[in-house]
Image (cartoon, rainbow, N blue to C red):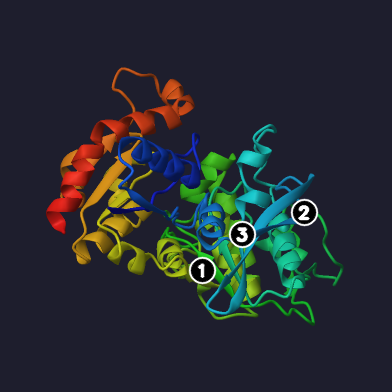
């Protein structure tokens, strides 16, 4: 019996690959008839690179870079071969992420995407034909200005003097000058949020507070100023593009400063991993992530997997750490399972993630087999 395990991470507990392997091991103990196809998924946020590198058997690279507050780090990213092209796959969070600087007080005035630009520059030097970057989990609210500086853009004041104290002194910029030879490969930006750069649903208002933003109007004006300067060199009104406000405006910055193209994170993963063909070849599909609720139905990976499974007539099981809005979810999944016992504290469940997943699978393996056989 062929089962496709196309599952996302359990955030704070296990990577998508670890979850998939736990399910595979539990099924093997229950019945050796299970033939497992592991396809870790992601939707453009944290875990995207691990999912792609695992699925496509890629290799890892390490880029010397700086974190959002300027400390030297080594930022990992992957290189895979797909459709005859060498592709670099990366996440901005490995260089400019909030988790990396969680040991320091939030400082949105100075937090920069410079390290993300260093990763892009490093991947370009490897001669890749395309770069895929997932944006999410950022510590920044600089509109991609730091990234631009790392790529060679120059920020000048009214006297033509270069400004180096960025993004703190962004309001002093009178002009942004592009580098003379910016030879980046095509950049695809994996992003499933729909926030524009500015306004009540923009970067500063929605995501700023989690990064320490208190004076939203100040940061809103700073992003508007950056956008005004950047759009003198790019297509007008990129700021209004859906996803421009992702990662503190890095969605905008990648379009304006690096000619990036925003695309659905899940669809990118699905295309890279040949997910449709793998669903078609399966007798049953298992998906899920750390938490399933009504938000799952708005562009999240497990819902994308479920839609494909339904379209191709395959039963689909969702295994999650926790479940909410079950009545809404039931219309999209043939079976919903929560690994966390109701009485168990969340921290304990996170620490026992592998064991709880394996126990859940072992208790329900016979139901999986029944679903698969009934649909054949």
User: Viewer-proximal residue, 173 or 251?
Assistant: 251
Residue at which label 2 appears: 65
Q: Where the C terminus falls, by quadrant?
A: bottom left
Which disc is residue 90 wearing?
3
Coordinates of residue 121 in the picture (x, y in percent): 74, 67
Tell me the crowding category of disc 3: few under 14, some 14 to 19, or many 20 or more residues within 10 angstroms, Cα based: many
Of the residues tagged 2 and 1, which is closer to the observer?
A: 2
Kindly state the secondary structure of the residue where label 2 is placed. Answer: strand
- What's the CA distance linking mark 2 and mark 3? 13 Å
Coordinates of residue 281 in the picture (x, y in percent): 30, 64
Residue at left 22%, top 44%?
368
Coordinates of residue 7 in the picture (x, y in percent): 39, 49
Tell me the crowding category of disc 2: few under 14, some 14 to 19, or many 20 or more residues within 10 angstroms, Cα based: many
Which disc is residue 239 wearing?
1
Do the CB atoms of the residues marked 2 and 1 lie less than 8 Å apart? no
Q: Is residue 325 visible?
A: no
């Amino acid at each position: 019996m062929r089962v496709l395990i196309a599952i996302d991470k359990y955030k704070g507990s296990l990577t998508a690959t670890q979850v998939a392997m736990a399910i595979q091991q539990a099924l093997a103990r229950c019945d050796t008839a299970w033939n497992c196809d592991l396809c870790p998924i992601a939707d453009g946020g944290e875990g995207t690179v691990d999912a792609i590198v695992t699925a496509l058997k890629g290799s890892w690279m390490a880029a010397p870079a700086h974190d959002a507050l300027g400390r030297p780090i080594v930022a990992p990213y992957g290189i895979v071969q797909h459709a005859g092209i060498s592709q670099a796959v990366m996440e901005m969070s490995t260089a400019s992420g909030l988790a990396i600087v969680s040991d320091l007080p939030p400082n949105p005035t100075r937090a920069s995407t410079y390290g993300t630009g260093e990763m892009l520059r490093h991947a370009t030097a490897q001669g890749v034909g395309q770069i895929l970057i997932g944006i999410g989990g950022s510590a920044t609210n600089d509109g991609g200005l730091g990234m631009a500086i790392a790529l060679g853009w120059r920020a000048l004041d009214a006297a033509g003097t270069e400004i180096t104290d960025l993004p703190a002194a962004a309001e002093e910029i009178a002009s942004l000058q592009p580098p003379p030879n910016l030879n980046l490969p095509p950049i695809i930006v994996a992003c499933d949020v729909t926030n524009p750069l500015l306004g009540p649903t923009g970067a500063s208002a929605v995501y700023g507070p989690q990064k320490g933003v208190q004076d939203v109007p100040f940061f809103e004006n700073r992003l508007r100023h950056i956008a005004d300067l950047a759009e003198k060199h790019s297509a007008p009104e990129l700021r209004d593009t859906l996803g421009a406000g992702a990662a503190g405006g890095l969605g905008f910055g990648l379009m304006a400063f690096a000619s990036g193209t925003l695309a659905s994170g899940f669809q990118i993963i699905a295309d890279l991993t040949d997910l449709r063909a793998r669903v078609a070849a399966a007798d049953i599909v298992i998906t899920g992530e750390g938490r399933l609720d009504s938000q799952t139905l708005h562009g999240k990976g497990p819902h994308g997997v479920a839609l494909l499974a339904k379209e191709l007539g395959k039963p689909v099981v969702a295994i999650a750490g926790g479940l909410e809005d079950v009545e809404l979810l039931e219309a999209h999944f043939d079976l919903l399972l929560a690994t966390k016992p109701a009485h168990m504290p969340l921290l304990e469940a996170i620490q026992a993630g592998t064991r709880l997943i394996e126990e859940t699978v072992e208790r329900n393996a016979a139901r999986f087999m029944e679903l698969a056989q009934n649909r054949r």
